[in-house]
Image (cartoon, helix red, strand yellow):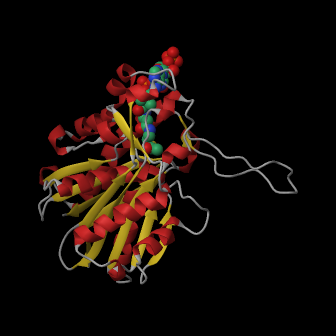
Amino acid sequence: MVSKIIGTGSCPGDRVVANGDLAQIVETSDEWIYPRTGIKNRHLNTLSGTSGMAASAAKLACENGGIDPKELDLILLATSTPEYCFPNGACQVQEELGAVNAAAFDLSAACSGFIFALQTANSFIVSGSFKTILVIGADDLSKIIDWNDRKTCVLFGDGAGAAVVRASEEGVFSGIMKSDGSKGPVLSCLARSGGNFLTGKTPKMGYLSMDGQEVFKFAVKKVPECIEELLSGQGIRKEEIRYYILHQANERIIEAAARRLKEPMEKFPMNIREYGNTSAATVPILLDELNREGKLIRGDKLVLAGFGAGLTWGAAVLEW
Ligand code: ACO
């Protein structure tokens, strides 16, 4: 058995915020942001929290896949921004969908989250444990961003994307996941931390902090390396790949990855201009857009790849 994606859905944040809007709150400009990142707008969530966006994307994915949520065996939610320590966000989605037969848990691998969750789902499918799995990447990063820090606040947006994955007798699915915990401080956000009545420290919340240039260098090296390793390990030639659906963190990172892979930019669809970096949601939102625009044809081979805090990175190749 192998995983096949049968439906996709997405839900960006409800409020569009343009570069010019951010220039009202920090010293920045469209002239600085757009050429360095490819971002014009981001969609911030003011309504429903991570689980609400995740559930909306999930409903659309179930409809698109033509399944009743009661058919789901498992819900995996990749997120770094759950509303609660517990219950997990996946259980909130389960309740919202009425997916009463599904087990549900969250998975945390920052911006690589959807790629890691998809591979986790595939392992359950290959082992025969589950047949129909909902995989979601969702983040509400605007709630952990320091809106006084122009180095980070201009980069991110909120959103959710989902895919229904089903066991299939035919197809292709293979993936690679990698981590380097020694680089944790390069991109981090402290959770509620600090103390109890013995330590005397007051718990505090953190904000996202990032060494942008370190992340940039890491991404342009590791992402193409990982894709090369994946494809050569599977004996798949790059000419066979229809699209590389990469984490949307920076247009220049995607262009650099394309150059290193010696593949044309037409194979690297992008939507970062509209949504910014929505963390675990970038890959499934883009996948859903391509699906709904009719750009994916059954039998196409796709590479999905992500990178992010941890540091974590990974890629998967699959047949649509
Ligand atoms: N507006 C105006 N000026 C700014 C802004 C801004 N929004 N942000 C930074 N600057 C200034 C800085 O203060 C600095 O000024 P100085 O030279 O007077 O000190 C100057 O611009 C250059 O700053 P750098 O940080 O060196 O800019 P850089 O060219 O490296 O671009 C960027 C920054 C776009 C963040 C780039 O490093 C990058 O894209 N890195 C990768 C980030 C990334 O991918 N993050 C997410 C990955 S993982 C995940 O998705 C969670």
Q: Taking 95 as reference, is 227 above or below it?
A: above
How many marks do you count on the picture? 0
The one nearer the camera, 251 or 291, is 291
Left or right: 318, with 279 as reference point: left
Query: Residue 256: x, y in percent?
Result: 29, 34
Residue 277 lies in what quarter of the image? top left
Residue beneath the point at 43% across and 47% down: 158
What residue lies at 71% left-to-right and 51% top-to-bottom?
193
User: Who's the residue at 86% across and 57% down the image?
Assistant: 197
Asked if residue 247 is positioned above or below residue 39 in the image, the reply reads below
Q: Is residue 48 above or below residue 26?
A: below
Is residue 5 in sight in this rendering?
A: no
Q: Is residue 74 visible to us here?
A: yes
Residue 122 spot, x, y in % from top left = 34, 71
Whether residue 180 sits left or right of residue 268 in the image: it is right
Q: At which x and y percent is residue 77?
A: 44, 64
For the N terminus, the image quarter is: bottom left
Q: What residue sits 35% from the left and 35% below the top?
A: 41
In this view of the protein, which residue sits in the foreground, 306 or 225?
306
Q: Quadrant of the C terminus?
A: bottom left
Residue 287 is situated, as x and y percent measured from the top left of the image, at: 26, 55
The residue nearer to you, when weighing 106 against 50, is: 50
200 with respect to 68 (left or right): right
